[in-house]
Amino acid sequence: MLKSLSPSLLVVIVNYRTPQLTIDCLQSLQTEVEHHGNTRVVVADNQSGDESVVVLRDAIASHHWQDWVTLQSLDTNGGFAAGNNAMIGPALESTHPPDYIWLLNPDTVVHPGALKTLLTFLEQHPDVGIAGSRLENLDGTPQYSAFRFHTIWSELDQGLRLGLVSKVLSRWILAPPIADQAIATDWLAGASMMIRRQVFEQIGLLDDDFFMYYEEVDFCLRARQANWTCWYVPASRVVHLVGQSSGVTGAQACQQRRPQYWFDSRHRYFHKHHSHGYAVLTDLAWLGGYSLWQLRQLVQHKPQVDPPHLLQDFFCNSAFVKGGQCRSKI
């Protein structure tokens, strides 16, 4: 059977209590889908428990999106990875599985050409397994969305926040300078990440034992271990309204305590891919660096930019307090 001239694409959007943002995202996708064709969009409502399903169903009907958008309501909220897997798994097992799967956050607005740019890049580079967009604020300024894998040194830098030390650790800092051209990277923000079907076939789905956060780091690392490369493609531009679902990042981050699932996901990542001893060292690096940062903050009267009780919560969830045990579900 001849392959279609146009590669098939499945776009997966997981909604949790952000129906209007999801509608805005779908509106930005409409022209993209019409231009490309051979594209399906599935919206999974992650048991929002509000009016999301009704609002989304009405919007799909009123905008006549039924030909390319499907809405599915999940019975349980297993987190971001589980919500995506619930849509990806059946698609891969179908008679005509998609060539590519695009994970797209509900709090995104797609710029014209963003879809085609990622798709074309993957078609032209068969060794690339994952490609991600340039994520932007509403004013067009870029967000960090291409990262290095977490190490002891990146954790020290994240806690300490001292420019001189960051320069010394420049090879290991988590977020290198934002590139203007397409570059290979360790991992990408999951807000806009297009994945080749063969990557899923080789390494499996997202690890849904991560409730939220670190699942994309884990997935990109597993892809790397299977010899797939990961690229940041800034010509694909997507507005990202940071943290609208979780509040862990963005403007709300310093107003509420960091949720338990963030600590559980971080704890799981280091134990899964390294060792208990390494996890202890990364926690010591962050805690030591952050303690010095708080001292500087006090002496230099720097503004508070972190969630309340972050040091206490981090210590209580550290590897040397929790040991090697990981909570698989939240």
Image (tube, helix red, strand yellow):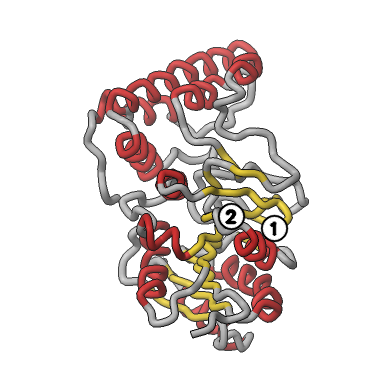
Across and down, in percent, residue 119 comes to: 63, 65
Total residue callouts: 2
Above or below — where is 297 with respect to 223? above
Could you say which disc has been placed on residue 265 in the image?
none
Q: Nearer the viewer, residue 290 or 185?
A: 185
For residue 102, what is the image quadrant? bottom right
Taking the image as shown, residue 190 lies to the left or right of residue 112, namely left
Across and down, in percent, residue 208 comes to: 34, 55
Across and down, in percent, residue 56 comes to: 52, 77
Q: Residue at 59% x, 85% y: name it.
A: 65
Above or below — where is 294 with respect to 313? above
Taking the image as shown, residue 170 lies to the left or right of residue 279, namely right
Q: Residue at 55% x, 72% y: name it.
A: 9
Residue at which label 2 appears: 131
Across and down, in percent, residue 170 comes to: 61, 23
Give the residue type that dot 2 points to: Ala
Q: In this orientation, does residue 2 appear?
A: yes
Give the residue type that dot 1 points to: Ser
Alpha-carbon distance for marks 2 and 1? 10 Å
Q: Nearer the viewer, mark 2 or mark 1?
A: 2
Of the residues under marks 2 and 1, which one precedes in the sequence? Answer: 2
Q: Residues within 10 Å of mark 1 (few under 14, many from 20)?
A: many
Residue at which label 1 appears: 236
Residue projecting furthest to the top: 299
Q: Nearer the viewer, residue 25 or 99?
A: 99
